[in-house]
Image: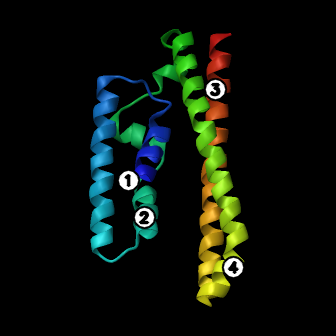
Amino acid sequence: MRQIDDYIEAMFAVLPKDKDVEETKQRILEHMYEKFEAMQAEGMNENEALGAVISEFGSIDEMKHTFGLSETTLENPSDFSHDALEQLLQQYEAFIPKQRKAIAISVVLFIMSPFVTSFFDDPIVMFGMIAAGVGLLIYYIGRKHDFQKLIQERKNLLR
């Protein structure tokens, strides 16, 4: 599931890209997928299961403590390079078109919600479309802020 992958990638972005961290990331992904499928089998819809799985995962700080990981990339500037910053900037540049599409989809959902509601004659459809649009905006604007903060922190380390 793309949302779980994106969530884990964002959580692990501050950690070093070594073998132990990658193995831990894969174990967590497998566990989250299993929980997601189990929750859907119990009758939860996709969004409910996704929210439950992510909320059970916890914060990056809890995960670092549980698995004994550290942010050596951020705590030790000598481990950080211009190449790593360039890679982060490339990831950010690849993210921007996705964000633009998400914003466009959100606007379409907002505009179309009254028309779809009159077609289905159910206001819940309208609120569902608006909620989906708001969710997209919150997610992509939050990711943009996270990227910008991480880029600024890493630029400061190189000074």
Q: Which mark is residue 21?
A: none
Residue at the location (32% across, 45% down)? 28
Question: Helix or strand or loop: what does disc 4 sit on?
Answer: helix
Residue at the location (69% across, 79% down)? 115
Find disc 2 in the rendering and name its residue: 52
Q: Earlier in the sequence, mark 4 or mark 2?
A: 2
Amino acid type, residue under disc 4 in the picture: Phe
Q: CA distance from mark 4 to mark 2?
A: 32 Å
Find disc 1 in the rendering and name its residue: 1
Q: CA distance from mark 4 to mark 3?
A: 41 Å
Question: In the rendered structure, are the residues bearing label 1 and label 4 in contact, judged by CB atoms less than 8 Å apart?
Answer: no
Q: CA distance from mark 2 to mark 1?
A: 14 Å
Occupied quadrant, residue 95: top right
Amino acid type, residue under disc 3 in the picture: Ile
Question: Helix or strand or loop: what does disc 2 sit on?
Answer: helix
State left or right for residue 142 relative to residue 73: right
Circle nearer the viewer, 2 or 1: 1
**Disc count in the image?**
4
Residue at the location (29% across, 63% down)? 37
Q: Earlier in the sequence, mark 3 or mark 1?
A: 1
Q: Earlier in the sequence, mark 3 or mark 2?
A: 2
Question: In the rendered structure, are the residues bearing label 4 and label 2 in contact, judged by CB atoms less than 8 Å apart?
Answer: no
Circle nearer the viewer, 4 or 3: 4
Q: CA distance from mark 1 to mark 4?
A: 30 Å
Q: CA distance from mark 3 to mark 1?
A: 27 Å
Find disc 4 in the rendering and name its residue: 115
Find disc 3 in the rendering and name its residue: 151
